[in-house]
Image (cartoon, coloured by chain):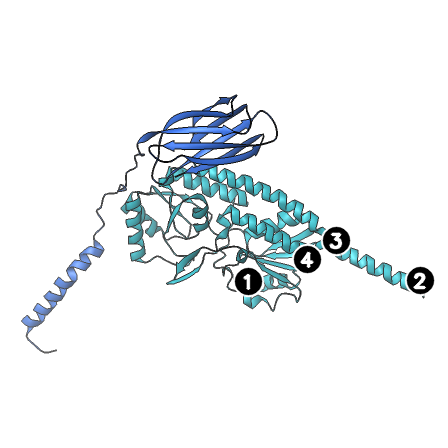
Chain colours: A blue, B cyan
Amino acid sequence: MTGSPLLRAAIALALLLLLAWPLQRFTTPRTQPTTPVASDTPSAKQTVHLELVATRAPFTYSVEYLGKIVWQGNSSESTTAGDIAIAFPPEGIDLVLKITWQQPGTSAARLTLTHGDSDPVSQTLWGDGSATQVLTYK
Amino acid sequence: MKGLFALAVAAALTAAQAYATEPVKVVSFSTILTEIASAVGGDKVDVVGLVKPNIDPHEYQPTPADLEQLSDAQLILASGKNLEHYLAKLSASAGATTQLVKVGDHFASLHLEESGQMVQDPHWWHSVGNVEKATRVVRDALAQIDPADKAVFAKNADTYLAKLATLDEWVREKVAELPRDKRKLVTSHDAFQYFARDYGFTIHSIEGVSTDQEPSAKQVNDLIDVIRQEGVKAIFLEDKLNPKVSAEITRDTGARIGGTLYADGLGDAPGNTYEGMIKHNTTTIVDALK
């Protein structure tokens, strides 16, 4: 190996400086916050109008949202309606409708949901005596 | 002469009856298909599961003893979708009349990237709907081999299908406990696409399709970014994931380990039955992400 020791030292120093940034990046533990960036708080609640129409009456019904009953009752008429306050994220919601008819035989029920300025959205289920179904609204 | 002829006919009929009452010999390369074949076939089948519970089907290779089982099998059930890379080599071991059914090839595939190529996702059993289709495929295959017991297979299949319908409804109700905007699934093995499709989840995997792949530093960093951006609360592991990788992810994101999932088939209880596996996976996922 030839050349001035000073020149060789300068080259070595330059190489070390070049490597310093990537070495520092790969060896330093991450220091970012350990909490997720996205918020865990649920979306703000809003009033949602529900209308349940059944082919037979009387019937009993319940509607669950996120595992909790948010609307329930008995109806002697074929149509019943009510308002609930729930979060309605852009991804939509799932409601679990459980209905039991007093008369046997095949029956159907339609649950129509209206929220804000959006158009009503309807989902239908069928059952013999009773029925349970997850209904998705977006 | 007439007496001899009658004797021969009687002997032939007796032999035919004996053959008809012999159970159909089924060999299965999937723990899920072993359960389905047993449920549909009942006492009309003799099912041998070569891939046992807790065995990784991605890494399984048939042994000489396994190959012997194939020699007198009437029906071989495979998951299909290219999961069993060894199937082509098995034809020499199987009998001339053996029927091979790659069950998963009978319904549509999702795809995922493996080593830069798009491949069929073989983990179809995480969709209860797919298992319903698989049940019908197995029922029809058994009926073709043993037409005399077609009605038995149909009745048993209907019973099993009714259980699956109840299970599917249970999963939908359980998943409904989780807001749709929180259905973000991060797992150590890219095995849950069919579950995600059916039940409204977005999926991110730490590794690729096979359990023998180790994630690269870039893959881990990308995943950390996704977990942060999406606000994912929990990730789910298989035993085989390098613990350093999961520790880095949880440390850097604040997400916690949500639990262990059955990814590649049946295992120990509660995942020793299909219903138990699906209920365990669903409960683990939903309760951790709430």
Tell me the chain of label 1: B
Helix, strand or loop for disc 2: helix
**Residue bearing the label numbered 3:** B21
Residue A27 image-quadrant placement = bottom left
Comparing B4 with B71, the one in front is B4
Mark 4 or mark 2: which comes first in sequence?
2
Q: Could you tell me if the residues under marks 3 and 4 are in contact, i.e. CB atoms within 8 Å?
A: no
Tell me if A100 is positioned left or right of B259 in this view: right
Q: CA distance from mark 1 to mark 3?
A: 30 Å
Task: For the N terminus of chain B, give its image quadrant.
Answer: bottom right
Q: CA distance from mark 2 to mark 1?
A: 51 Å
Residue type of the residue flagged with mark 3: Thr
Dot 3 and dot 4 within a common chain: yes
Which residue is pictured at 34% across the width and 37% down the height? A89
Vertical comparison of A38 with A97: above or below:
below
Helix, strand or loop for disc 1: loop
Mark 1 or mark 3: which comes first in sequence?
3
**Residue bearing the label numbered 2:** B3
Mark nearest the camera among 2 and 1 is 2
Dot 4 and dot 2 within a common chain: yes
**Residue bearing the label numbered 1:** B62
Q: Could you tell me if the residues under marks 1 and 4 are in contact, i.e. CB atoms within 8 Å?
A: no
